[in-house]
């Protein structure tokens, strides 16, 4: 019996590991099994699962609860899309082995449900060989236990969520911070090793639970110190202080002025696009000047940057253009009487077009609300039309070291070098992953491109995430890979990984998420 999962090797002739069954804990009841899939070392009774809900004691052997997830390519482009099943039902343990499809291999073994390489010196549970376009390939498949990991969250909104570096809390626990805003989006950094392992037990537990939920495309409510409460979910519009966001701004105030200047110039005498970052004033702006517009004489609050571009017209907030104002006239100081004139037409609009107001100057050069002309309303609607839907994007960032690399090769640095030399393709649940430059294997992946429920946790605490390394068989051999544990794809489909007891594992097939390249494509 292999102590790793309590199963036998695939066949009598398969190489036996050089490890022995660890000594039994004398204080453990006879009917229990000690699970070594993570450092917690749960003692699991018959029919029960461990603390991570991932392993069960079934008949005196530890089995993986979740099915192994496999990707199957869609049919040829000429075939009807509705003929391709999105999901194939689970296979019973005694189901007949599935044959490969005709032609090139159309099945990719993901690490979702594959089990881990912990303890570190254990080869990956699935080391799968296949042939792609006549090239012998190997894919090393494992679920990684990540302590060094975080989420980078992009929230498409102009609303002010909180000051940079502000604390982000979940269930009252500190789980991250606000980081630098990007164009039209607020950014959060969540998780990370200091929150996972460096704080209290509750902080670590809440952090990994929050990360698991967001990674699995579920909704989470966060509170930002000194700022807003936000409800976020990958692929969905954020909800800020109870209000769903609809639009991502078309650009800053200056950009909006330039984009729509030609449309504005014949319909209004002055246009102010209110923005927390750069508020644009049309007649001062280079676009208005190039179109020969008459200076309006408007004087606006804030710090002038260049002609027609103003910083700090108001404080950040959830009002017009990401400012704290509800009345746009509060940012106007008045008009130069030498330049302004009665009857002047003024449009004030936000960067998303959600807020807009039309004014006409009276004899005292005071702006009076008026009915917005249909032609101007059309331009305001055009601004909104050019705003993309507001979404929440969740990127998982993890440092792949320890058992991950040892599960691939006896000389881990060779794997790192091979990845940096573009000899190895890294995927997470079959989804393309970006590997950061520099030392180590720091990867980043969009959770929306990954299969549902790809993430788990262990109570160390840590995140469990799928990772696959695909490369040529010859390159795998050259970097010192575990060649004795390589199994052909057909054999894996029939009997499971090298630690299988010979019965087909529970598994399910899905088609790759829309837009994802096939994991084994060059």
Image (cartoon, rainbow, N blue to C red):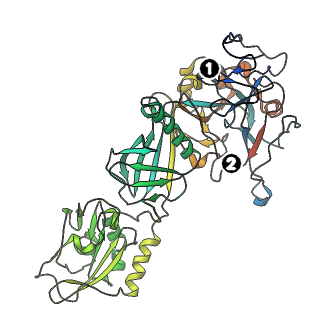
Horizontal side, residue 239 vs residue 474: left or right: left
Residue 455 location, quadrant: top right
In whole angstroms, how far apart are the C-alphas of marks 2 and 1? Answer: 31 Å
What residue is drawn where x is 59% and y is 45%? 216
Indicate whether 377 appears above or below 350.
below
Locate residue 230, reporting x and y percent.
Answer: 44, 54
Taking depth in this image into account, of 15 and 220 the one nearest to the observer is 220
Residue 348 location, quadrant: bottom left
Taking depth in this image into account, of 317 and 448 the one nearest to the observer is 317
Q: Mark 2 points at which residue?
A: 512
Locate residue 188, reporting x and y percent.
Answer: 42, 47
Locate residue 260, reporting x and y percent.
Answer: 36, 74
- Is disc 2 in contact with disc 1, using a CB cutoff of under 8 Å? no
Q: Mark 1 points at which residue?
A: 119
Badge 2 crowding class, 10 Å Cα cut-off, few under 14, some 14 to 19, many 20 or more, is: many
Q: In which quarter of the image is the N terminus?
A: top right
- Which badge, 2 or 1, is on the more N-terminal residue? 1
What residue is drawn where x is 75% and y is 51%? 74
Q: In which quarter of the image is the C terminus?
A: top right
């Amino acid at each position: 019996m292999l102590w790793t999962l309590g199963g036998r090797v695939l066949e009598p002739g398969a190489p036996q590991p050089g490890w022995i069954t660890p000594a039994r804990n004398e204080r453990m009841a006879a009917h229990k099994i000690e699970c070594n899939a993570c450092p917690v070392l749960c003692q699991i009774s018959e029919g029960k699962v461990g603390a991570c809900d991932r392993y069960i004691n079934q008949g005196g052997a530890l089995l993986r609860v979740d099915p192994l997830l496999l990707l199957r390519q869609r049919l040829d482009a000429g075939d009807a899309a509705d003929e391709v099943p999105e999901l194939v039902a689970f296979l019973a343990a005694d189901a007949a082995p599935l044959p490969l499809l005709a032609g090139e291999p159309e099945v990719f073994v993901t690490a979702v449900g594959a089990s881990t390489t912990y303890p570190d010196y254990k080869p990956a549970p699935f080391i799968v060989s296949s042939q792609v376009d006549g090239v012998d390939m190997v894919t090393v498949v494992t679920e990684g236990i990540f302590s060094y990991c975080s989420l980078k969250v992009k929230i498409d909104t102009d609303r002010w969520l909180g000051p940079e570096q502000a604390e982000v809390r979940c269930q009252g626990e500190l789980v991250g911070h606000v980081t630098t805003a990007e164009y039209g989006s607020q950014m959060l950094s969540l998780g990370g090793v200091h929150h996972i392992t460096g704080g209290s037990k509750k902080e670590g537990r809440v952090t990994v639970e929050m990360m698991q939920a967001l990674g699995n495309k579920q909704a989470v409510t966060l509170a930002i110190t000194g700022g807003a409460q936000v409800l976020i979910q990958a692929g969905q519009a954020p909800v800020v202080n109870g209000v769903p966001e609809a639009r991502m701004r078309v650009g800053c105030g200056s950009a909006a002025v330039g984009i729509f200047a030609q449309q504005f110039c014949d319909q209004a005498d002055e246009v102010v696009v209110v923005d927390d970052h750069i508020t644009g004033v049309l007649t001062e702006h280079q676009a208005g000047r190039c179109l020969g517009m008459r200076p309006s004489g408007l004087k606006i609050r804030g710090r002038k940057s260049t002609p027609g571009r103003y910083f700090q017209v108001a404080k950040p907030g959830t009002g017009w253009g990401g400012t704290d104002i509800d009345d746009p006239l509060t940012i106007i100081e008045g008009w130069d009487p030498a330049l302004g004139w009665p009857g002047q037409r003024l449009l004030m609009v936000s960067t998303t077009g959600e807020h807009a107001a039309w004014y006409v100057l009276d004899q005292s050069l005071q702006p009076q609300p008026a009915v917005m002309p249909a032609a101007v309303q059309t331009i305001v609607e055009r601004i909104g039309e050019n705003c993309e839907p507001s979404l929440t994007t969740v990127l998982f960032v993890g440092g792949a070291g320890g058992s991950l690399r040892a599960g691939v090769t006896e000389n881990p640095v060779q794997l790192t070098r091979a990845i940096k030399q573009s000899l190895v393709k890294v995927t997470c649940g079959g989804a393309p992953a970006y590997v950061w430059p520099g030392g180590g294997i720091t990867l980043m992946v969009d959770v929306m491109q990954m299969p549902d429920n790809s993430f788990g946790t262990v109570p160390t605490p840590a995140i469990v995430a799928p990772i696959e390394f695909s490369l040529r068989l010859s390159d795998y051999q050259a970097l010192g890979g575990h060649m004795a544990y390589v199994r052909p794809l057909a054999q894996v489909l029939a009997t499971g990984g090298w630690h299988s007891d010979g019965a087909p594992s529970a598994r399910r097939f899905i088609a790759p998420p829309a837009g994802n390249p096939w994991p084994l494509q060059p």
